[in-house]
Image (cartoon, grey):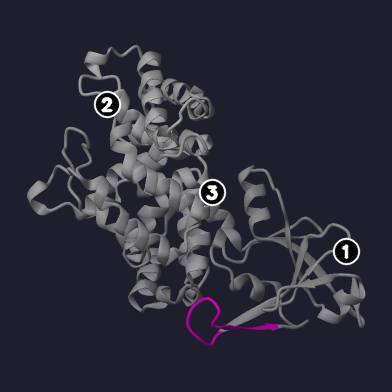
Amino acid sequence: MTESGGYVQIYVVGGAIRDELMGRAVTDRDYVVVGATPEALLAMGFRPIGKDFPVFLHPETHEEYALARTEKKNGRGYHGFSFYAAPDVSLEEDLARRDLTINAMARGEDGVLIDPFNGRADLEARVLRHVGAAFVEDPVRLLRLARFAARFGDFSLAPETMALMRRMVANGEIDHLTPERVWQEISRGLMEAAPQRMLLVLRACGALARLMPEVDALFQTPERTEFHPEGNTGAHTLLALAAAARMRLSLPARFATLAHDLGKALTPAGLLPRHHGHEERGDAPLTALCARLKVPAACRELARLAIRQHGKMHRVGGKEALTPGTMVRLLEACDLKRRPERFAELLRVCEADARGRTGQEDIAWPPREIWQKAAAAFCDVDGSVIAANLADKTQIADRLHMARVAAVRAALAVTPADS
């Protein structure tokens, strides 16, 4: 490709090269165009997207093609940059602005790998390393690195990179991120293969205390050691998140797993290391966390149910099992009849919670079958029949509740004396 007598070069860059070298499936490719102008790409039918820098969609494949560019920091946060894109910007200059060495590789149309920052060596050594000192200028990079740590569970962080991340937290750069961008990266990290590593990285650099202080506080919250050999609620939360990932839970379920024990950070000192009543204390920190990050309603609602109900959900089938009446009140509080799919997710969150203990990572969770039987019996009760046979409509709610209790008692073969 030529423009005004000059030669235009096109390179595949970034994640596509990284994943190709790792033997992972390449789902999409990004391209950098060197030696071109916006006008030239428009003339060839490319469609511009975005306002911050010159990125274009290919007229046929709709893949992204960006003009080679450099960046200059001129303000706070990730919006505080000016960009320079022109035919004289080289590929190496473009790669130099990228976050990690493993994302700063390219391949030209001749197939030759271009690796000016030794990304392939870091890939082989399983190391996440920043490209240059400009890493500290964009706080999103800190979150992205934590997300990559969650994606690539066997990669370590270069010590000098961790030092830069701590500097970003200390100088307040991270405080200029918008809630929407923080949630975007956190939610992506929660969906990676090892989401617990994202929390570990954020905590190691001090960012967790700034972005999610409610979660960070769990690492200073002692637990009864017979239930949590790790000694604190934060360690249990990490194990539960790892279980949630192995179980391939949805984003709302993984967020609920992250949040289910938030109330334990507010346990009065006189109760420690026990946490009686932490379910009731969990609403306030969850509300604060969700407001700060603008967490979507589906995640917030499931997390609130998990906080309030997970302790009871484990208490079926044993000597101190819930009565059918208590089980029905819980199912009513979960709005089971209208939201059965949400209750199914709550069961999975509780299962991840049960597996969040050393030595119990892949245990079976017997309460699941009991709750499923109870839920089926609960839903089989036809409220319309009850309503039709009652002259006093004010009694419908009580009669419906009583019928559900009887149905659950029968389904679980619980005698009235036991209930």
Label 1, secondary structure: give it. loop
Please provide percent x and percent y for residue 188: 53, 54
> Of circles 2 and 3, which is in front?
2
Report the front residue among 64 and 134: 64
Q: Which residue is mark 3?
A: 124
- In the displayed structure, 330 sits above or below 221; it is above
Q: Nearer the viewer, residue 251 or 236?
A: 251
What residue does disc 1 label? 59
Earlier-in-chain disc, 1 versus 3 = 1
- Tell me residue 82's x, y (percent): 61, 85
Which quarter shows the N terminus?
Answer: bottom right
- Mark positioned earlier in the residue sequence (2 or 3): 3
Q: Which mark is residue 322?
A: 2
Quarter location, residue 166 = bottom left
Nearest the eye: 102 or 136: 136
Kindly indicate whether the residue at mark 1 contacts the one at mark 2 (C-beta within 8 angstroms).
no
Which residue appears at 64% of the width and 43% of the height? Answer: 24
Mark earlier in primary sequence (2, 1) = 1
Residue 113 position in % (x across, y down): 70, 58
Amino acid at circle 2? Leu
**Residue sitting at x 38%, y 14%:** 410
The boundaries of the magenta stretch are 73-84
Q: Marks 1/3: CA distance?
A: 36 Å
Q: CA distance from mark 2 to mark 1?
A: 62 Å
Which residue sits at x=75%, y=83%? 86
